[in-house]
Amino acid sequence: MSNLFALRNYARKSPAALPQSILFSSSPRSLTIYDSYPKSIFHFLVLPRVEAGSSVGIDDLESLKTLFARGRESAQHVLNALNEDAQKVKREIEQEMQERYGFKWPIWIGFHGAPSMHHLHLHVLSSDLCSERLKNKKHYNSFNPKLGFFLHIDDVLSWFDSEPSYYQEMIKLDQKAYEKLLKEDLLCWKCEEPMKNIPNLKAHLQEEWDKVSKREKVKAERKRKLEEKQTTESERIEKKVKLDD
């Protein structure tokens, strides 16, 4: 089967049929898998499953555009469910961040305006964008959180509360308009500094990540020493009280 349809193939399967190298977690309404080509230290995809008794079928879950075509109420139900499961994944990532690195950094949750693979999938990835898999302008611009190609889940969900005319405009999801964004110049999403090429951008992003990592580790060490000092002082006071008694 073509890689373009790999996600649809996964979504059709029982979670038990997927190997641990692919499946991260599951619920009756979604599967969360490891991204095969992660663009950050942490990168997962949340895929909607066809729920028992639902009128939303596998073809309706082809993309955001096909889901919205199924109807506003159905789309809102599916997207709210995806978001709830993605938030659980986010919390697990944050726990892993804390255990592995000693601190947490932002996690982005969103869709691509013009996805390259069949079947709706919600990206959950850390904001470092430090990965050997990030190799070209298209890769970077598709996740630049300020460019517009990456549709943050909170923004998409806000469409349901907007004016009808705005909602209708947003759900058009003009693929050509989104694809043009992938050709925009390279800019660091944090400082907006222009970059000549991908190697320069990746080196810059790594420097930004190293700064964050160093700063947060210093903060964590200060907190540890303060807590240690407070514990020592509490033990001293407790010992003194016992002696006085």
Image (cartoon, grey):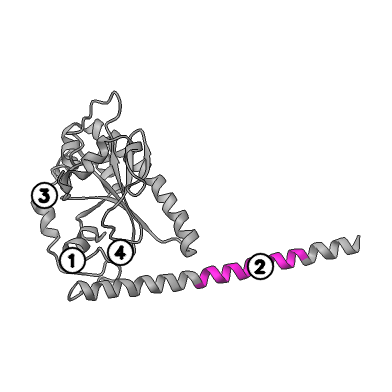
Quadrant for residue 168, please give it. Answer: top left
Q: 10 Å neighbourhood of mark 3: few (<14), some, or many (≥20)?
A: few
Identify which residue, 19 or 28, lies in the foreground: 19
Tell me which secondary structure the magenta stretch mostly adopts. Answer: helix
Quadrant location of the N terminus in the rendered image: top left
Reading the image, the residue beneath label 2 is 228
**Amino acid bearing label 2:** Glu
Reading the image, the residue beneath label 3 is 175
Q: Secondary structure at mark 1?
A: loop
> Mark 4 and mark 2: span between their CA atoms?
35 Å
Reading the image, the residue beneath label 1 is 136
Of pointers 4 and 2, the one earlier in the residue sequence: 4
Of pointers 3 and 2, the one earlier in the residue sequence: 3
**Amino acid bearing label 4:** Leu
Q: Residue furthest right?
A: 245
**Magenta residues, as a range?**
218-235
> Mark 4 and mark 1: span between their CA atoms?
12 Å
